[in-house]
Image (cartoon, rainbow, N blue to C red):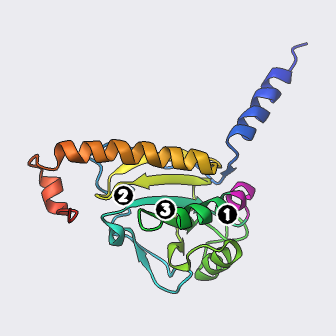
Amino acid sequence: MLSHRPLVVLLIATLTLSPACSGGKPDPYVGNMTDFSYGGRISKEYGPSASGRNIEIADFKGRFVWIDFAAPWCPPCRRQAPIVRDLEKSYGNKVVFITMMTSDASWSAPATEYTARQWAKQYGLDPAHVTPTSERARTIPQHIIFSPLGQTLDWNIGLMTDIQIRSALAKQMREWNQWYTENKNTPSVLLSEIGDLGE
């Protein structure tokens, strides 16, 4: 009889390395310098946020944006929230950390302003940056990094440590700054439409 032990060990190791809660299939990762759509989110309003106001991602043009998808029923998300809070304080204006609540107490219950308010209060997050979203069919926690121009730079699924997030941000910020330095004077319809960063 064949043993299932190697498969079980592999499954446990996988869950230990990158714990996540499944609520459906994740968004496809684009990750290239021609994607200026924030994955379709650039002009979409979310909210009301925990502060009572709607969030539009395009309002943060000129800064790197880290989006964290979470829900109260997801244990890895609860472990992720204090890490996001500490990073939000550490990075200040360099990076905007936004938490999008994908659902309420169960994965099938839609997130509301109350969900966002409770999450922000419980974990000490900026209420203006915690908002409900209707994008619920995903595996969480899930993270997306956007450039100051709105390009999708990186996408990750699963609980990330402080060091992993800092490392991902450092890599993407370094590579994007190099790309921008090399391309900011190159004629481009997309870049000219978006405008200058005010440098």
Q: Secondary structure at mark 1?
A: helix
Q: Which residue is mark 1?
A: 82
Q: Secondary structure at mark 2?
A: helix
Number of other residues with Cα within 10 Å of mark 3, as a class: few under 14, some 14 to 19, many 20 or more: few
**Are circles 1 and 3 on residues that touch, CB within 8 Å?**
no
Give the residue number, with chain letter if any, for mark 3.
91
Q: Is residue 68 above or below residue 53?
A: above
Residue 23 versus residue 54: which sits nearer the camera?
Answer: 54
Measured in 3D between alpha carbons, the distance from the residue under mark 2 to the one under mark 1, in whole angstroms, is: 25 Å
Residue at mark 1 to residue at mark 3: CA–CA distance: 14 Å
Residue depth check, mark 1 versus mark 3: number of the one nearer the observer: 3
- The reply, left or right, for residue 50 in relation to residue 35 is right
Residue 30 vertical position relative to residue 71 in the rendered view, above or below: above
State the residue in front, 165 or 191.
165
Give the amino acid type for the residue marked by disc 2 in the picture.
Answer: Tyr
What secondary structure characterizes most of the magenta part? helix
Q: Which residues are magenta?
A: 73-79
Q: Residues within 10 Å of mark 1 (few under 14, many from 20)?
A: some
* Tag 3: amino acid: Tyr
Residue drawn at the location 22% of the way across and 63% of the way down = 197
Q: Position of residue 158 (x, y in %)?
A: 63, 47
